[in-house]
Image (cartoon, rainbow, N blue to C red):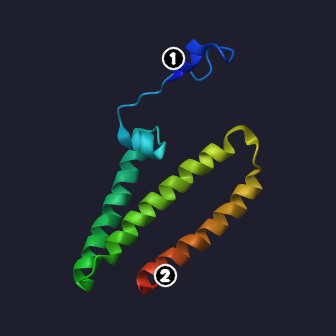
Amino acid sequence: MASFIAGLGIFPSVSGIGTEVETEGDALTVLTGLDDPNMNSIWLGVTGLTFLGAVGLAFITKTITPIGIHVFSLVFWTSWIRMSSVLSYGGFIPVDLLLVATVAVMFVFIAAIVGMLTGSG
């Protein structure tokens, strides 16, 4: 698609901007943005242990709600961390505003978990 648009000649061509395609072989690095292999190990360890805890709690309570909460939490916070890194890039949005947004998102997260636990969600 980029070659087609460049071939039209409508927009001026700028070399070096947007022409590099970043390819990484590790899906965990792409998902979490953790470049350090040790941090990848810690992230996998923490998520693995919390998943085992969720499975154990699901077995005890005979419901799959803890597993759903674990998956939701993992996706929710991973996406928030990735989005906040994008928003903070370039310094256009003040850090204080991102902190206020993070606190607001924490309340939304808590409300979602309460909704899952009470069945009103």
| 26 in relation to 13, above or below | below
Q: Quadrant of residue 58?
A: bottom left
Residue shown at 36%/40% (left/top)?
A: 27
Q: Position of residue 76 (x, y in %)?
A: 49, 61
Quick check: 50 above or below 13? Answer: below
Residue 72 sits in quarter: bottom left
The picture places residue 46, in percent across and down from the top left corner, at: 38, 59
Q: In what element is the residue under mark 2?
A: helix
Q: Nearer the viewer, residue 78 or 112?
A: 112
Residue drawn 61% across and 50% down? 84
Residue beneath the point at 66% across and 17% down: 10
Q: Is residue 92 left or right of residue 27?
A: right
**Residue at point 55%, 56% (across, down):** 80
Q: Seen in the image, is 81 located left or right of residue 37?
A: right
Amino acid found under the numbered disc labelled 1 = Ser
Residue closer to the observer: 55 or 118: 118
Q: Which residue is mark 1?
A: 3
Seen in the image, is 5 located left or right of residue 101? left
Position in image of residue 37 (x %, y %) = 39, 39
Q: Is residue 110 above or below residue 75?
A: below
| Tag nearer the camera, 1 or 2 | 1
As measured in the structure, the alpha-carbon distance from the residue carrying label 1 to the one carrying label 2 is 49 Å
What amino acid is found at the position of numbered circle 2 in the picture? Answer: Val
Callout 2 crowding tier (Cα within 10 Å): few <14, some 14–19, many ≥20:
few
Question: In the structure shown, which secondary structural element does the residue marked by tag 1 occupy?
Answer: helix
Q: What residue would you read off at disc 2?
A: 114
Decide: is 86 above or below 113: above
Among the two numbered marks 1 and 2 on one chain, the one whose residue lies closer to the N terminus: 1
